[in-house]
Image (spheres, rainbow, N blue to C red):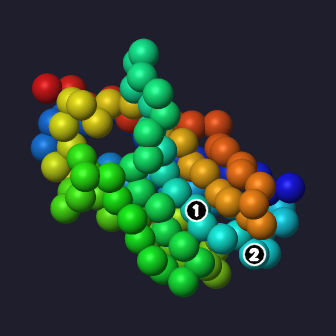
Amino acid sequence: QVQLVESGGGLVQAGGSLTLSCAASGSIFRINYMGWYRQGPGSQRDLVATITSDGTTNYSDSVKGRFTISRVNAKNTVYLQMNRLKPEDTAVYYCKANRRGVVYWGQGTQVTVSS
C-alpha cells in the first residue's frame, strides 16, 4: 500500500504562484511514476503533469511553460510549482502514484484562482 498526502493548496489571485506537495509513504519502493491531476467543478479528472522515477516529465498543453513538476526521491515527495495561475486553473488537485501497475490517489487539495 502507498499513502499519498497532498498539501499547499489555497486561494491565490490570477498571475500568482502556488507550490503543491505530495508526500508518499508506505510501500514506496518501485513507484514507477507520480503525477498531478485536477478536477474542476462538473469536469472530469485531467492530467496536469507526471514524472517518472528517472525524472522524465510530461505536461498537459494547458500548463506547459507555467507549471513545473519535480521529485525529491530522498523525501519521497513530488512537487508542483504553479506560476502565472489563471482562473481556469481552479480545481481540486490530486496526486497519483503508480507502483507496479497499481494506482494510488491522494485525497486532493483545493486550488482557487480569483480573477
Q: Position of residue 109 (x, y in %)?
A: 51, 37
Quick one: 96 or 101, which is closer to the camera?
Answer: 101
Left or right position of 81 against 92: left
Label 2 and label 1: CA atoms lie apart by 11 Å
Looking at the image, which residue sits at the far top? 42
Q: Position of residue 33 (x, y in %)?
A: 60, 67
Q: Which residue is mark 1?
A: 34
Q: Which residue is mark 2?
A: 30
Left or right position of 25 against 59: right
Does residue 32 sit above or below 50 in this rendering?
below
Tag 2: amino acid: Arg
Residue displayed at 66% across by 71% down: 32
Number of labelled discs?
2
SS assignment at label 2: loop
Looking at the image, which residue sits at the far front? 101
Based on the displayed image, in which of its 4 quarters is residue 15 positioned? Answer: top left
Q: Position of residue 40 (x, y in %)?
A: 40, 26
Quick one: 14 or 53, which is closer to the camera?
Answer: 53
* 2 and 1 marks in contact (CB < 8 Å): no
Does residue 78 sit above or below 38 in this rendering?
below
SS assignment at label 1: strand
